[in-house]
Amino acid sequence: MELTSLLIYIGIFITLFLLAILISDGDLTLMFAERFGKRLSSVKGQVYWIVGASSGIGEYLAYELVANGAKVVLSGRRENELQKVKAQCLIIGKKSGISEADVLLLPVDVAKLELHQQYFDAVLKHFGTLDVLVNNAGRSQRAEWMNIDIRVDKDMFDGNVFGLLNLSRIVMPHFLQKKRGQIAVTSSVCGKVGAPCSASYNATKHALHGYFETLRAELTTQGISVTMLCPGPVFSDLLSACATDTYGQKLGGAMTKKDRRMSTERCARLCAVAMVNHLDEAWISINPVLLSLYASQYAPSLFRSFNGRLGARVAMTLRDSRNDLVNSCKQDSQQVKSD
Ligand SMILES: NC(=O)c1ccc[n+]([C@@H]2O[C@H](COP(=O)([O-])OP(=O)(O)OC[C@H]3O[C@@H](n4cnc5c(N)ncnc54)[C@H](OP(=O)(O)O)[C@@H]3O)[C@@H](O)[C@H]2O)c1
């Protein structure tokens, strides 16, 4: 083949690849699995424990699962919210034969490690088994790297990492005894790149990859599968309990309808597709965030150099799709003004 023809074929391939990414809201393996993979109906009768089911992605994941006949354990700290989610699950799950006994409400604080065995015993007492643990609980952050109180970092790791890690270790003997079990972990695009103004949060999400990918490497031959879910911006309650740089402080923010984010339903559906197809990792995001994730993975230095030129303010605006939250990056905004 002539060099010119080869270059034309490569050009066409790259153009089609970029177009496919631009019209997708998930990585291409996930999109393929959604179209041609295992159907969601395969969850029927399986027991899913969703830790972080009281709002947002976990709440809608519960709806997706019960709609397809799965039994669910709903956990989180806010019992009132869990009650509402349970009521909705019973309505949605009715067509699939879901009844009161198939939806267990189990209030859980993942940061309370000493109670983890007790929580899991309650799951086993009710259902007698567990098939999938969904480690979805998490808290975001808006803060400048320079100013973060180290107690905030520790606090974020306690909830976002150590709580989920310990719970998974408690559940693992049960999975190993059955020779089958799945752990799904809600990481984030921030678990793959260092998005500005969320250092502790990004670090917790990166840490989840370290812990759970090692688990996969060690136990995959013993029937254990691990699915890392990496959403980009999604509508949820995430900004309200969001941490700042100050210990004990909450951002108390809220998303607005005008924000550019993926719908919670769509994100939950793609999470469910990734789980039933046992994908090792799934990227779930609208563009340009999805495209930037591809760039960071396949052209790491180029992506970082490009990002560096854009500056933190632009990256923050892309992430939150509005300007008010960008003020958490004061240092950068001052720099921009003085430039
Ligand atoms: N929304 C996004 O743009 C986005 C993007 C990437 C990744 N994520 C990740 O997606 C996951 C779900 O977040 P979301 O966006 O759906 O936000 P959300 O609506 O705030 O949901 C967070 C869930 O985590 C639970 N949770 C937090 N701390 C907990 C604790 N100590 N113990 C037990 N449960 C706890 C919350 O329940 P209680 O408050 O009732 O305890 C709630 O159910 C998080 O891990 C988040 O990092 C979200």
Image (cartoon, helix red, strand yellow):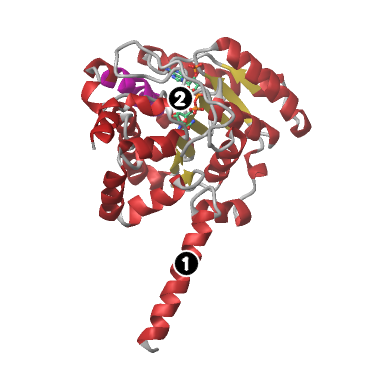
Front: mark 2 or 1: 1
Determine whether the beta carbon of the residue marked 2 sits less than 8 angstroms from the nearest atom of ligand 1.
Answer: yes
Binning the other alpha carbons within 10 Å of mark 2 as few (below 14), some (14 to 19) or many (20 upward) gives many
Binning the other alpha carbons within 10 Å of mark 1 as few (below 14), some (14 to 19) or many (20 upward) gives few
Judge whether 163 appears above or below 310 on screen: above
Instruction: Name the N-terminal-most of marks 2 and 1.
Output: 1
Where disc 2 sits, the SS reads loop
Residue interval drawn in magenta: 153-169
Q: Which of 193 and 30 is in front in this view?
A: 193
Q: How many labels does the image show?
A: 2
Q: Could you tell me which residue is drawn at 53 percent across and 36 percent down?
A: 261
**Left or right side of 215 for 81:** right
Task: Identify the residue position indicated by label 2 in the image.
Answer: 137
Task: Identify the residue position indicated by label 1 in the image.
Answer: 15
Q: Which of 160 and 94 is in front in this view?
A: 160
Q: Could you tell me which residue is drawn at 30 percent across and 40 percent down?
A: 311
Residue 293 visible: yes
Judge whether 315 appears above or below 110 on screen: below
Indicate the quadrant containing the C terminus: top left, top right, bottom left or bottom right.
top left
Q: Could you tell me which residue is drawn at 39 percent across and 48 percent down?
A: 293
In this view, the residue farthest toward the front is 338
Instruction: Give the x, y percent position of residue 4.
Output: 38, 85
Q: How far apart are marks 2 and 1 (CA)?
A: 38 Å
Choose top left, top right, bottom left or bottom right for residue 244.
top left
Tell me which amino acid carries mark 1: Thr
**Left or right side of 18 for 204:** left
